[in-house]
Image (cartoon, coloured by chain):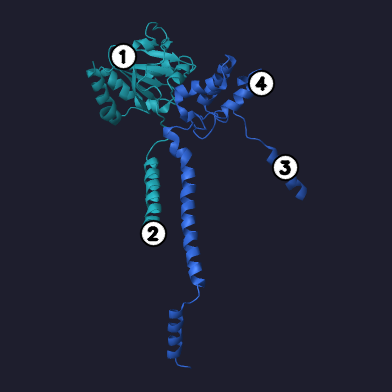
Chain colours: A blue, B cyan
Amino acid sequence: MKRLAALTTALSLMAGPALAVLPEEQLKDPALEARARDLSKEIRCVVCQNQTIDDSDAPLAADLRVIVRERLLAGDTDQEVIDYLVARYGTFVLLKPPVGVDTLVLWLGPLAAVLLGGVGVAFYWRSRARASTEAVRPLDNDEKARLAALLKETPPS
Amino acid sequence: MRRLAFIAPVVVFLGIAVALFIGLGRDPKILPSMLIDKPLPAFDLPDARPGTVDRGLASTDFTGEPMLLNVFGSWCVSCRVEHPMLLRLSQEGVPVHGLNWKDPGDAGARWLADLGDPYSRIGYDPTGRTGIDLGVTGAPETFVIDKRGIVRYRHVGPITPDVWDETLAPLMARLRAEA
């Protein structure tokens, strides 16, 4: 039983995601096909927006996969293929959007959040440190006299 | 200083809350068109209707007056919903051209024979390449093209009477008035 569980775990860990790329879409040249696959993993399917065109079964994603391969066969560089798609669908097709005015919040937002949080933490530690140094300061003479007076006032029992 | 330390996070929180709330009301499926204020990409397509040889669609057909370019397919359910509206518009004299997108064989032509044909010209785009050149993400989509062949607006989804009355009709009137 234990062995069976180990085997199924091992097998399920080995299973990769199902490929959307159809055999007839693939290029004969393995180097070009590898470039096409790498490019396809950077390009968002505009129909099912959280998938890459490499993953997506949408017909439009298949069209775009074929276009990527056609451009590569025609001798385009990776950047030229990307430019071709961006000219039609905008930078939204790139899963790694370029830094620009419209994506500034996206790129700098996390940094701003960390900075803001850091400032908050710094304030918190500073106020705590101040509170603790105040706590250990010895009583000055005035305070000692007041304390003695208070203790004297209190009845012994 | 203490007040600021209290107010700043509240302001930041409210800012993010408002931005996210606005985002909730937006349709993430609608991408901005890259063609706005640019000329139509060049294309010259045969007619989708067999027998009508000289009524295919080329990008050079968009000249003289503002026109609509409607991307449709017989496989597209929303196109069927939109269809009566297009028929109404063509009866009212609005120039509507069609792009029969990714339809196999004469499926588009038969669909039009069944439901009525609102298009003056139709380009047949079985491979979908012209649609991709236009940045089409799905059907129906409608482009508004001015009298110089410049794309001025894209509507994603069916043209409902509200969309026509509130957005497209005023835009077409404005484009007609342009020099």
Q: Are marks 1 and 3 in contact (CB under 8 Å)?
A: no
Question: Would you name the residue on which mark 4 appears?
Answer: A31
Between the C-alphas of marks 1 and 2, the distance is 61 Å
Taking B93 as reference, is A19 above or below it? below
Q: Secondary structure at mark 4?
A: helix
Which sits in the foreground, B135 or B117?
B135
Question: Would you name the residue on which mark 2 appears?
Answer: B2
> In this rendering, which labeled residue sits more in front, label 4 or label 2?
2
**Image coords of residue A38 (percent x, y):** 60, 27
The residue type indicated by label 3 comes to Ala
Q: Are marks 1 and 4 on the same chain?
A: no
Between the C-alphas of marks 3 and 4, the distance is 31 Å
Please rate how many residues cluster around mark 4, counting C-alpha atoms within 10 Å: few if below 14, some from 14 to 19, many from 20. few
Which sits in the foreground, B71 or A52?
A52
Residue B8 appears in view: yes
B86 on left or right of A68: left
Q: Secondary structure at mark 2?
A: helix
